[in-house]
Image: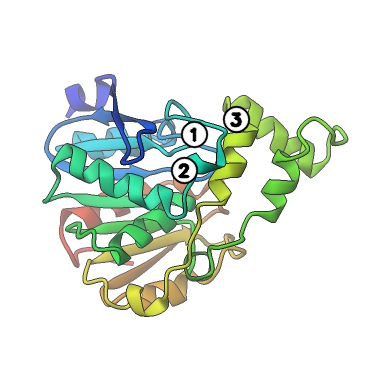
Amino acid sequence: MGSAAASAPSRHTFHAVDGVRLAYRELGTGRPLVLLHGYLLTGEIWLRTGIAQRLAADGRRLILPDLRGHGDSGRPHDPADYPRDALSTDGLALLAHLGLRDYDLGGYSLGGRIAARMMALGARPGRALIGGTGLDPIVHAEGRGDDYRRVLGNFGTFTAGSPEAQMEGWVTAAGGDPIALMRVLDTFVDTPPRDLARVPVPTLVFAGDADTSRGSVEDLAALLPHGRLLRVPGDHFDALQTPGLIEKLAEFLAGWPALRC
């Protein structure tokens, strides 16, 4: 347990189907678990919260990609490099690149939406984790992100202390590229509820109890044929660090339907 948790993640790259270079980290050995991060973040979030280390210590191979336009992955500015559904296509390409057939899949916020979309497109993990998103951002994804567009498209023009300036600070602190991040918003596509209703994967849908502005997690869990719901203390930004969450995720991944909510 100690050696897996203490080891540093290795870094790797591969090329998406359209040639954009994509990066990912790996930690631990064992059953593969792909975890997708949220918008403006990188795969590092799973390490900063300790989730990756804890699950690796359970005997898992954690695979933590940086999404297109984020982190160490390619961040081109050409709109042609951000086709519709690019993030889901990239996720499926990562599975193919690694030759994964028996694996688990998860994501938080935008990463959760991508995980759901990948399963609607045919990905079949053994178990899935969808955190920080409800149903509406998945079924009505196109055109979302107006507030982000306004900030990213007018970087450096906002009054200090304003919510917009705060968002600028987040992007800058994360080393984000405003143009690339804005292009990412153009890749979103809707996923029809009927496609989610056909996903046969045991899925844990989880969110902070104060995270109520990103659609209904209750509706998402109810729509998925094998969905389970977990509410934890916290809002969208601190739910991943809620005490006890990691143990609940580990318990769910260890065997359906062992989770007690």
Question: Residue at coordinates 78% horizontally, 38% vertically from top-left?
Answer: 154
Number of the front mark, 3 or 2: 3
The residue carrying pointer 3 sits among few (fewer than 14), some (14 to 19) or many (20 or more) residues within 10 Å by Cα, namely: some
Residue 92 against residue 216 in the figure, above or below: above
Choose between 81 and 33: the one closer to the eye. 81
**Residue at label 3?**
177
Residue 191 in the figure: left or right of residue 227: right
Residue 18 in the figure: left or right of residue 109: left
Q: Distance of mark 1 from mark 2, alpha carbons? A: 22 Å
Disc assigned to residue 70: 1
**Residue at label 2?**
241
The residue carrying pointer 1 sits among few (fewer than 14), some (14 to 19) or many (20 or more) residues within 10 Å by Cα, namely: many
Q: As shown in the figure, which amino acid type bears the numbered disc 1?
A: His
Q: Position of residue 197 (x, y in %)?
A: 32, 78
Q: Distance of mark 3 from mark 2, alpha carbons? A: 26 Å
Residue 259 against residue 155 in the figure, above or below: below
Question: Residue at coordinates 35% horizontally, 39% vertically from top-left?
Answer: 51
Q: Distance of mark 3 from mark 1, alpha carbons? A: 8 Å
The residue carrying pointer 2 sits among few (fewer than 14), some (14 to 19) or many (20 or more) residues within 10 Å by Cα, namely: some
Q: As shown in the figure, which amino acid type bears the numbered disc 3?
A: Asp
